[in-house]
């Protein structure tokens, strides 16, 4: 089992990573001094596959706990789900000494973290990601939130978990499409980090998609370390952390415009393609770099197929993004691998052209 320290000032925690380590949860809670009454928020599909195993672990450890099962979809990343969690906590007299445990993908993690950050002005929570996407990205860094008024993650908090436990065995039941979503965020790290990581992912893309444990573990470990360092430097996204949103302003708009028929990780792939195109149009990237970098994305053309996209609506949705300033869409773009520029604004026409490029490449 690997241990990665996320040394955020005042908010440090450990990420544990390995195969079949969920059994170690009781011991890890003790060693990390995470006591308190336990409340589990569990993804419905995870519960379907792992209910017996989880119950066995909880019973053996003599946990005193309650649980709630949530159907993870973007519509349920909502105030209604938040209320369900809060109501269950109140009904069962959970106090400030409680510990909430999120077991699921990014949807469960984000809404649970938000519930924990707002219940009694903030109680402890931990993340047990069960998707590749949540393992490489959302479980670490403390961004919590819900969707509201047709806008992704518009309501939320920065609130760090007290521990993250990544058990790669969970991926054995993940649908292929969800592995691809995880690869979407991994591709983001290829552009944020260094050529070596880019080359490694490019060479091992099939091993990632087919859940090869050794490759997956290496990639998660590097992504978490990288993200951890960025979050340590800028927990509240006033500067460097903005780079983690590469492709996401476009991606969130595609998700909403498509009424969530396209999944987040898939939309990230299309969003990065739009961001690379715009980077080229603004001469931040040369046409040669654009072609070389695009290879990583274009291989998924047949696997991600958007329906009909309205470019103007997509642009309108982008105008509600959290990173915008002075009423202008602010973008994260690329000069080279590991050389990201943030807060870039440009004309509406250029953004619409970049949207058009993304949807043309990834349309039926
Ligand atoms: P998800 O939570 O919707 O999970 C994907 C699907 O896989 C769901 O149907 C779920 O039920 C199922 N599932 C989960 N674990 C499973 C398992 N082990 N076996 C079988 N099925 C399983 O999606 P996701 O891709 O994990 O997360 C996407 C969400 O994360 C988006 O809402 C996105 O905005 C958010 N996100 C947040 C951050 C952050 O920093 N907080 C970063 C990236 C993404
Ligand atoms: N997923 C972007 C961030 O955590 O900042």
Image: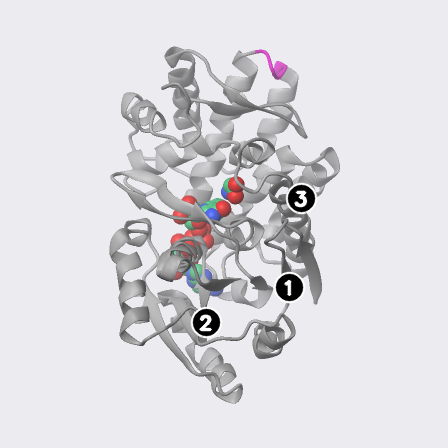
Q: Are marks 2 and 3 in contact (CB under 8 Å)?
A: no
- Residue located beneath label 3 in the image: 229
Secondary structure state at the residue bearing disc 2: loop
161 in magenta: no
Task: Please report the residue visible at 43 percent of the width from the left and 26 percent of the height from the top.
Answer: 358
Disc 2 from disc 3: Cα separation:
29 Å
- The x and y percentages for residue 192 are 63, 34
* Residue 198, numbered circle: none
Q: Closest to the observer: 199 or 19?
A: 19
In the image, is 66 to the left or to the right of 140?
A: left
Residue 233, image x and y in percent? Answer: 64, 40
The rendered magenta stretch, by its main secondary structure, is classed as loop
Is residue 303 in view?
Answer: no
Q: Is residue 282 above or below residue 196?
A: above
Q: Position of residue 92 (x, y in %)?
A: 31, 76
Q: Residue at x 44, y 41 (%)?
A: 266
Q: Nearer the viewer, mark 2 or mark 1?
A: 2
Q: Which residues are magenta?
A: 283-287
Q: Is residue 58 left or right of residue 309?
A: right
Q: Which residue is mark 2?
A: 97
Please state, as top left, top right, bottom left or bottom right, where the C terminus lies in the image: top left
Mark 2 burial class by Cα count in 10 Å: few <14, some 14-19, many 20+: few
* Nearest to N terminus: mark 2 or mark 3: 2
- Residue indicated by mark 1: 16
Residues packed near mark 1 inside 10 Å, few (<14), some (14 to 19) or many (20 plus): some
Q: CA distance from mark 2 to mark 1?
A: 23 Å
């Amino acid at each position: 089992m690997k241990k990665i320290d996320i040394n955020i000032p005042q908010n440090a925690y450990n990420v544990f990573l390995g195969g079949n380590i969920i059994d170690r949860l009781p011991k890890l809670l003790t060693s990390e001094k995470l006591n308190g009454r336990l409340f589990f928020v569990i993804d419905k599909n995870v519960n379907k596959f792992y209910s017996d195993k989880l119950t066995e672990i909880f019973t053996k450890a003599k946990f005193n706990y309650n649980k709630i099962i949530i159907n993870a979809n973007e519509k349920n990343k909502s105030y209604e789900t938040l209320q369900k969690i809060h109501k269950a906590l109140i009904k069962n007299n959970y106090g400030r000494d409680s510990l909430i445990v999120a077991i699921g993908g990014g949807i469960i993690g984000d809404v649970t973290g938000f519930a924990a950050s707002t219940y009694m002005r903030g109680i402890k929570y931990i993340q047990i990601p069960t998707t590749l996407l949540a393992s490489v990205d959302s479980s670490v860094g403390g961004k919590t939130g819900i969707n509201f008024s047709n806008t992704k993650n518009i309501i939320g908090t920065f609130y760090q978990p007290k521990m993250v436990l990544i058990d790669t065995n969970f991926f054995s039941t993940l649908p292929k499409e969800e592995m691809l979503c995880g690869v979407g965020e991994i591709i983001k790290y290829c552009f944020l980090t260094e050529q070596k990581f880019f080359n490694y992912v490019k060479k091992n893309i099939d091993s990632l998609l087919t859940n090869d444990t050794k490759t997956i573990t290496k990639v998660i470990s590097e992504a978490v370390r990288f993200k951890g360092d960025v979050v340590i430097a800028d927990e509240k996204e006033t500067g460097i952390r903005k780079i983690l949103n590469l492709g996401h302003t476009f991606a969130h708009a595609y998700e909403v415009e498509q009424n969530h028929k396209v999944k987040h990780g898939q939309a990230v792939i299309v969003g990065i393609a739009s961001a690379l195109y715009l980077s080229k149009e603004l001469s931040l990237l040369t046409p040669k770099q654009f072609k070389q970098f695009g290879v990583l994305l274009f291989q998924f053309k047949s696997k991600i197929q958007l329906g009909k996209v309205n470019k103007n609506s997509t642009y309108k949705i982008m105008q509600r993004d959290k990173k915008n300033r002075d009423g202008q869409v602010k973008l994260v773009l690329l000069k080279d691998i590991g050389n990201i520029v943030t807060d870039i604004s440009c004309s509406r026409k250029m953004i619409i052209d970049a949207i058009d490029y993304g949807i043309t490449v990834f349309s039926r």
